[in-house]
Amino acid sequence: MQTDQDQRTGDGSIGTPTMADVGRMAGVSAMTVSRALRGNSYIAKDTLERIMAAVDQLGYVLDQSAGSLSSRRSGFIATLVPSIDNSNFADTARGITDAIAQTSMQLLLGYTNYSIAREEELIESMLRRRPEGIILTGGKHTPKARAMLANAGIPVIETWDIPENPIDTVVGFSNADAMEALVDKLVMQGYSRFGFITGSEASDTRGHQRHTGFDQALARHGLASKRVIAIDAVPISMSHGGLAIRQLLQRFPDTDVAICVSDLPAFGAIMECRRMGIAVPQDIAIAGFGDYEIASVSEPGITTVNVDSYGIGAKAAEQMIAMLENRSVATTVGTSFHVLLRGST
């Protein structure tokens, strides 16, 4: 028999929504809701539609652990990252793992492939197993995901960003400010004809914020910001960087510096310049973002922005532990970034 962990509050308002709340909104019994959410094929279509509409509106998540966990504690922290192939996000996950090693908790990791729709699916799947808390990458989520997280009754930490409307607690930095700092350094080096290489910013919100910082910095310096090559992919790779630098130089041959949304396309751009017989930085300078390992071993080394990927994870986990122990915490924890000037500029 399905039971609900959370009940109405003493003043009659609804805290974390229950199966009974869904039933009342849909005009059916809690048992019918339970059957519908467990895939019972005998539920009428119009009834199922009313139930699912109520589920979405209330942000209800079926508790699959109810029958098996008498302690009501799962012992894990859920973490969602855009990609497991990206070394920055791998470092963030490692920071979380190292920080929670002092506890008995474990990390449950999922990756969204830069899709907020996929993130919504993973949030629902993970919340069904009642994690102690959840750590997310970025501050953009679907309305249903926000509702589920707001009603989950567990700590929620958004990282890698400073969202305008956080769900709970934030550990991150301004991608726009970090990109502005990079542009400022390059202007001080004497560059004035800036190009920007990016990916599909509709999916990559951090890439969009970096582009915003790029535009803002050039506007402050009275420089044009129209030299942009956008590749319809996310994340953009080394090969995309090679393609993009060719397009940039064909359209804007007098560009003296190209900033890439991350270090991977920056490395691809440098390799493509080498194949074309274009000297970096003598003919064109190239910079990246993120301080991936490849940026330091590339020849020349890639000018970039270090954003302390590991520290973001470690601080998020420390914040999570404090919240689970009911200690007072800051709602926003800013993390550091700094520009690294190397031989590519």
Image (tube, rainbow, N blue to C red):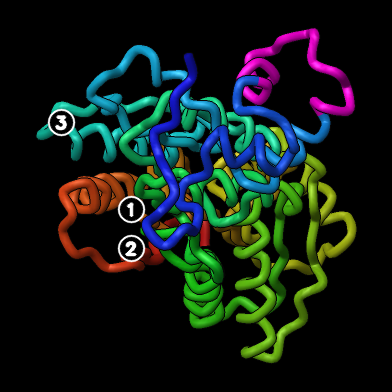
Residue assigned mark 3:
101
Q: Is 107 placed left or right of 176 in the picture?
A: left
First-in-chain label (2 vs 1): 1
Percent coordinates x, y for residue 143 in the rendering: 68, 51
Mark seen at residue 6: none
Which residue is depicted at the point 76% across and 39% down? 53
Q: Residues within 10 Å of mark 2 (few under 14, many from 20)?
A: some
Q: Which residues are magenta?
A: 32-48
Q: Is residue 323 above or below residue 49?
A: below
Using the numbered discs, state the Cα–Cα distance from disc 2 to disc 3 in whole angstroms: 21 Å
Where is residue 178 drawn, in percent x and y? 48, 68
Q: Secondary structure at mark 1?
A: loop
The answer to whether residue 254 is visible is: yes
Across and down, in percent, residue 137 comes to: 49, 47
> Residue 216: x percent and y percent?
65, 80
Relative to 144, is 64 on the left or the right? left
> Relative to the observer, which residue lies in front, 30 or 257?
30
Please name the residue that numbered disc 1 is placed on: 308
Q: Are marks 3 and 1 in contact (CB under 8 Å)?
A: no
- Quick one: label 3 or label 1, which is nearer the N terminus? 3
**Marks 2,1: beta carbons within 8 A:** yes
Where does label 2 land, which residue?
335
Q: Secondary structure at mark 3?
A: loop
Q: Is residue 259 above or below residue 102?
A: below
Please, what is the three-letter code of the amino acid marked with disc 2?
Thr
